[in-house]
Image (cartoon, rainbow, N blue to C red):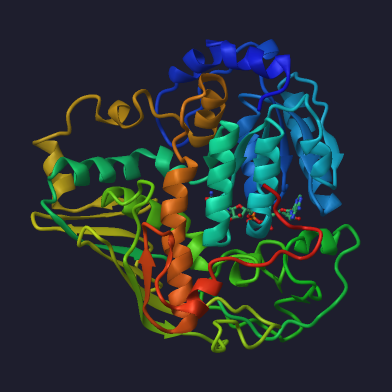
Amino acid sequence: MPKTNRRRFLKSTSTLASATALGVFSSTSIARSPSPNERPRFALIGCGGQGTGDARRALAFGDMVAACDVDSSHSAYVKDIFTKRLGRQGKEASIETIEDYRAIIDRDDIDAIICGTVDHWHVKIAAEALKSGKDVYCEKPLTLTVDEGRIISKVVEETGQILQVGTQQRSDERFLKAVTIAHSGRLGKIKKVTVGLNHNPFSKPLPATNAPKTLNWDRWKGPTEDVPYRFLKNGKDGQKLVRNLGDGSVNASNCHKEFRWWLQYSGGKMTDWGAHHVDIAQWIINQCGPGEGPTTIKPVMVETKVPFDENGNPTLDDRYNAPHRFTVHVQFPNGVLMEITSEGRNGILVEGTKGRIFVNRGTIAGKPIEDLVSNPLSGGWLEDIYGGPVVEHVNNFFDCITSRKKPASDVWTHVASINTCHLSNIAIRLGRQIEWDAAAQTIKGDAKARAMLARDSRKGYEIEI
Ligand SMILES: NC(=O)c1ccc[n+]([C@@H]2O[C@H](COP(=O)([O-])OP(=O)(O)OC[C@H]3O[C@@H](n4cnc5c(N)ncnc54)[C@H](O)[C@@H]3O)[C@@H](O)[C@H]2O)c1
């Protein structure tokens, strides 16, 4: 429950909401900030690439009071660049650097957190922050398992706090147009939706070595297994990595940035990109309400450099282990087939009886899009989606801190779609079809598959609710 007068004051003022509501939509538009004495105070937990970007956008709407990271070089960097940035705007910054996020949870002068940590920490940190009366902007994928979705949904329900998931495609006009066109009936009855996520990279074995002095490796691992830090410098030493995709990274490791290719810490492209595209695709086909869910999930193609054992666990622990290539068929209760695949173009292809459209971050195309010139959508279609102007995603979070309205990416819709990704990974790892019982929220019949719906946390890092 909110516990400070300061928080109640923020909730009762409408100035922030009306000021941000003036924001003209674009995926980068930022509405004007209200006066400084009304600004929420926020902390960034997880000062890596994405968290830093989120916090940079948040500086327009709130005052950042702390930068927390288990790698002190990351929090120091964020403090430095934001202090200079605010200095250039004639503003004084007072950002504390902190290693242990619990020091932030314990403070009651902080209204909100942005959680940009690695995936395996999201739910524990978000749940503790919500329970301490803070609102939370948490990066995607919110959860690592189906069970974590149940836990975090319960905490949001019980606390009534705001939780916005960092799936910013829900605040992007291009994707919202695709949803509106599909729902308008212009595509006819939707039969199939194909979600392209791209291949997972693979790596050579990565040698165990000492973690950098600035990194608290034990705290980075947190709830996951106690394993050695692994690192391989790419390039001059001749040990060039075998990678199918360049993502800008130079070194391979089981830590910063590269954690997403390890199933211990993430779900590979299935959850990294699936959190965005499966989410929009499920919205398009009207399968994001509570209680709804996939019926059967069938792997139709899997190519992996690290084989899985009969329990679905990777058989090698010294290299990237998310399956290199995959195609999964998800048959929804409403008859729509969703194909989730590493093949083809990154994006979403929607096929109906009357037409098809393709949408990704760079384009929206197809005959129904061309037809908009002569037959446009009704005026105000964008405002109809959330009942008001659509603003940039972090902006929406700060609006909701004041208005207490449901954010653009709420826990319910996110859990419904990220569960599809988790279930798809379970089917891939076991190499067989599974069946999801939406009413019971479990997998029918298959004990090994059911065992993969949850994971034990390392002692001392359990999620308490
Ligand atoms: N919304 C998007 O489009 C988008 C894009 C990229 C990444 N992401 C998400 O953002 C998250 C971070 O990704 P990234 O690429 O920035 O990774 P990263 O490795 O660069 O950053 C993660 C940071 O979290 C820190 N960290 C780990 N455990 C912590 C803890 N207990 N307390 C405090 N700090 C901790 C790490 O030291 C690191 O600095 C991931 O969940 C990722 O999926 C979202």
Write the residue at 75% across / 18% down. Answer: 90
Q: Outermost residue, right direction?
A: 213
Q: Percent x, y for residue 130?
A: 65, 37
Q: Is residue 282 left or right of residue 121?
A: left
Q: Percent x, y for residue 290?
A: 38, 47
**Which quadrant of the rendered structure holds the N terminus?**
top right
| Front in this rendered view, residue 306 or 226 | 226
Quadrant assignment, res 106: top right
Write the residue at 65% across / 71% down. Answer: 264
Q: Is residue 324 visible?
A: no
Write the residue at 72% across / 86% down. Answer: 238
Q: Where 83 sits versus 245, above or below? A: above
Q: Percent x, y for residue 30?
A: 51, 27
Quadrant assignment, res 185: top left
Q: Where 198 sits versus 156, above or below? A: below
Q: Where 34 sits versus 400, above or below? A: above
| Front in this rendered view, residue 196 or 158 | 158
